Amino acid sequence: MTRRWELDMLRGLMLVLMMLTHLPTRLSSPIGQPLGYVSAAEGFVLLSAFMAGMVYTRKGRHAGVVAMRQAFWRRALVIYRCQLLALLFLFTVIALLGLTVDQPAVKNLMSFYLQHPFTGLLAGVALVYQPPLLDILPLYILFMLISPWILAHGLRHGWAGILGLSLGLWLLAQFGTTLALYDLIVRHTGLPVPFNETGAFDTMAWQLVWVLGLWMGCSMVVAPQAMPPQARFPGWLVGVALCITLVTLAWRHVAGQVPTVHHPDINLLFDKWLLGPLRLINLLALIVVTVRFGPWLAQRLPRLHALEAMGRSSLPVFCAHLAAVLVVLALFGETNPLRPWWEDAAVVLISLAFMLVVAHGWPHVARRARRQGRPAADAVLDKRPSPSAYSQRT
């Protein structure tokens, strides 16, 4: 099975958009959520789940559920190691830089760790303490750990029950269930980590994005006729999805990233961290439009090999983007409209170049590690495919 270059390119695009959003430059606001009230994070999680669904379903059907589960767990361990390295980088290099230059942005970013270093370290290793920007990989790890049971149940009994349960959990999250569970845990364990330091993403809500992607990827293997290159969506559904996509796209670029200034209740419906109802509708509309018109666009648009390279080495490139953003925050601080344009441009270009170097260099590191019998951080996912090796990638 060969790689899907269009999926690699989309993942590379999501990584670039995340980098542009997270870097404290003038581009952060206009580039953030460029397609409506949906961010690159939703796209990256959905695509990662989609590829996991394809790869590990194939693994489960060819080698059995036990082998599939072990492959998921090995992958989760790789991502966990990356999270530990990111925490180590933040707690040492970035902390030293931020404190040396007395950078408020860094102090705010890791305020809990600076106040409670021992607790912050232990809680960070346990994935309970998740500083801003370092809260995506823990989400990814959790989803990888529970995915074997989701896929196994879907393969044996179908996906209707799983999708219904996932939608129910998302609905519970909209009414504050996650915070209620946190309060319950604090009462019984005395957990010292504040709720706002446990990660911005509401796991109970965001699992719906992962489950949707996992289901779609699994369906591509089990019933590829059900999702041909141009999915047979009813015409009315495509029309509604296209209208929603165009309306939210225009709304986003006219009103800005905050849908409305005077109606916070409406803004909550578009909330990113909670995956609000209108945001979910926006995402579903984009999925329909992409699946329907994506193959047509793929045949006509030029292939962007730089983005494909980033998508193939997604995990190390994601970590490179994190390192670049943290260093820029430590040296320059938050976005400053008085900062010269050339400085912002230099920051973006250097960060992009760093990500490209990692994207093109990592496959060589992974191949060398495999020859020496050692696992590379992203060798499972991002090595060049062979028929026997593809089933272990996500």
Image: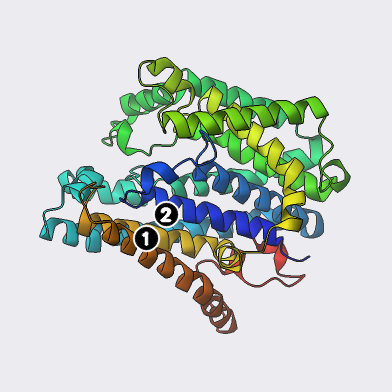
Numbered circles on residues, count: 2
Identify the residue under disc 2: 19
Q: Earlier in the sequence, mark 1 or mark 2?
A: 2
Residue at horizontal 48 percent and vertical 63 percent from the top: 317
Residue closer to the observer: 254 or 208: 254
Identify whether 248 is placed above or below 360: above
Q: Quadrant of residue 108?
A: top left
Per the image, label 2 sits on a secondary structure element best described as: helix
Residue at horizontal 35 percent and vertical 44 percent from the top: 130
Identify whether 362 is placed above or below 262: below
Residue 323, position as x, y percentages in the image: 35, 61
Q: Does the image show residue 99?
A: yes
Q: Quadrant of residue 146?
A: top right
Q: CA distance from mark 1 to mark 2?
A: 8 Å
Q: Amino acid at mark 1?
A: Val
Per the image, label 1 sits on a secondary structure element best described as: helix
Identify whether 71 is placed above or below 131: below
Residue 279, position as x, y percentages in the image: 54, 28
Identify the residue under disc 1: 348
Q: Amino acid at mark 2?
A: Met
372 with respect to 322 (left or right): right
Q: Does the image show residue 176?
A: no
Q: Which mark is residue 239?
A: none
Residue 23, position as x, y percentages in the image: 34, 52
Residue at horizontal 71 percent and vertical 64 percent from the top: 3
> Where does the N terminus fall, quadrant-wise?
bottom right
Pointers 1 and 2 in contact (CB under 8 A)? yes
